[in-house]
Structure formats: C-alpha cells, structure tokens
Amino acid sequence: PETVRREIETQREQLARAVEDLRKGLGDATDLAGKLRANLPAVAATALGAGFFLAGGIGASMRFLARKGRER
C-alpha cells in the first residue's frame, strides 16, 4: 500500500509539472503584445505603408508629380 501511495504521489507531481509547463507554453504562444513589441520597427513600417496605400497615396503622389511636370 505504501509503495502505491508513493507512486501515485510521484505521478501527481509529474502531472502538476506538465500542466504548469503547458500553461506557460500557451501563455507564451498567445502573447501578441510581446511579439509585436519584439518586431516593432517592422510592424510600424508595414502599418505606415499599408496606411499610405489605402489612403490612395500612390495615385495622389503620381498625380502630384504629373501636375508638377506639366507646370514647368
């Protein structure tokens, strides 16, 4: 009986460690803020480019340059 109790206790401790490791791994995998912070320059450049593109920046820039060329 004592051997069985020790084995059960050992299994319980191993299971508790495994669950804790799983929780830690899940927290690291879902840490979006940490991932963004680590890649902030790339994220900022991408956001700036996407905003410029969505705002029609390319077309507006081309029209501006074409207008300047005709005025000269």
Image: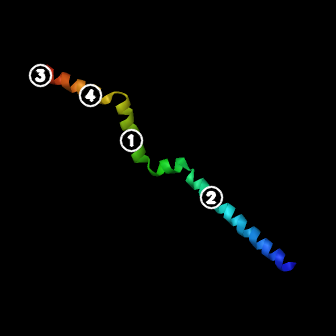
Asked if labels 1 and 4 touch by Cβ distance under 8 angstroms, the answer is: no
Mark 1 or mark 3, which is nearer the start of the sequence?
A: 1
Quadrant of the frame with the C terminus: top left
Relative to 66, does residue 32 appear above or below in the rendering?
Answer: below
Asked if labels 2 and 4 touch by Cβ distance under 8 angstroms, the answer is: no
Mark 1 or mark 2, which is nearer the start of the sequence?
A: 2
Residue at image mark 2? 24
Q: CA distance from mark 3 to mark 1?
A: 35 Å
Mark 1 or mark 4, which is nearer the start of the sequence?
A: 1
Residue at image mark 1? 46
As helix, strand or loop, the secondary structure at mark 4 comes to helix
**Is 69 left, or right, of 57 in this rendering?**
left
Q: Nearer the viewer, mark 2 or mark 3?
A: 2
Q: Position of residue 48 (x, y in %)?
A: 38, 37
Residue 72, numbered label: 3
Residue at image mark 4? 61
Q: CA distance from mark 4 to mark 2?
A: 49 Å
Quadrant of the frame with the N terminus: bottom right
Name the residue type under label 4.
Ser
